[in-house]
Structure formats: C-alpha cells, structure tokens
Image (tube, rainbow, N blue to C red):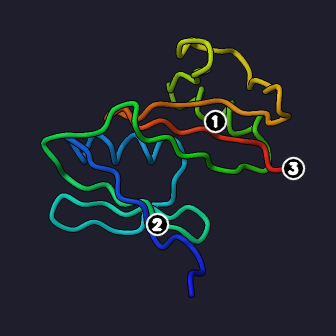
Amino acid sequence: MLESIHHIVLFCKETELSKEWYEKVGFTYVNGFDGMHWFKLGGTYIMLHPSDTTNPGMTAIHAGVHNVEEMFQHVVSQGLEPLDHQQDSKRIDAPVERPWGDVEFELVDPDGHQWAFTQIK
C-alpha cells in the first residue's frame, strides 16, 4: 500500500543554477548524476531534472517548517526575496498569516516552481 511520497521531480532549464538556489534555501543536497540533482526534505527527495521546458506557475509545493520566522530570516540572508502569492507575488518583509490560520511565505525557484514555507502547528 501507499506509504509516502518518495520523490518529486522538478524540471529545470539550468539544473546547476537551480542546485545553487536550493542550497541557498537550505535543502540538504544528496547527490548528482548527469545534470540531475537530488535534495532531501524530511522523508522525501526533490529531484532537479534537466529539461527544455518547465511548468512555471503550475507547481506549488508547501514545506512545513518549525520556525517560519527563522526560515524567513535565513532566506533573506541568502539574498532571496520572500513573496506573497496572494498579493500578486509582492515582496514581503515578514511571513503572512492566512485567513485559514497558516503562517507562511513563498519563494519562486529559477524555473518558476513555487515553494511555500508554512509554520507547523
């Protein structure tokens, strides 16, 4: 039976550029082979796969974090720009509390894949 997601494949035009971005965010690098790169996120792997096309704006992944403020400060210190996708991807200065109770912020990787970092309750 189903137990978990083993890995998610994200198609990237420049996997080396994407690899650098994922390292800045704080994902744990596992290994690479032939332009592909694997990162670990909890019990799931994120695979960056070379491709001529991507799905910008079509992929949205929410990662749970224990301290959203700390994560926010980390990504800012790495030169990344946290966004609020519900405000036309406007740059924000702090995590946002959603009407449904989540506290989070978003980042967009070099290929347009959206990542939300959400406080674990």
**Residue 114: image x %, image y %?**
48, 35
Between residue 57 and residue 80, name the one nearer to us: 57
Q: Which numbered disc flags the more N-terminal residue, 2 or 1?
A: 2
**Residue 16: image x %, image y %?**
25, 46
Please tell me which residue is depicted at 52% across the width and 31% down the height of the picture. 107
Q: Quadrant of residue 73?
A: top right
Residue 74's tag is 1
Q: Is residue 9 above or below residue 76?
A: below
Disc 3 to disc 1, C-alpha distance: 20 Å
Q: Is residue 115 left or right of residue 10?
A: right
Contact, CB < 8 Å: mark 2 with mark 1?
A: no
Please tell me which residue is depicted at 75% across the width and 23% down the height of the picture. 96
Between residue 21 and residue 7, name the one nearer to us: 7
Q: Amino acid at mark 2?
A: Tyr
Q: Amino acid at mark 1?
A: His
Contact, CB < 8 Å: mark 3 with mark 1?
A: no
Q: Which residue is mark 3?
A: 121
Q: Is residue 56 left or right of residue 81?
A: left
Q: Quadrant of the N terminus?
A: bottom right
Q: Which residue is mark 2?
A: 45
Q: Quadrant of residue 97?
A: top right
Disc 2 to disc 1, C-alpha distance: 21 Å
Disc 3 on helix, strand or loop? loop
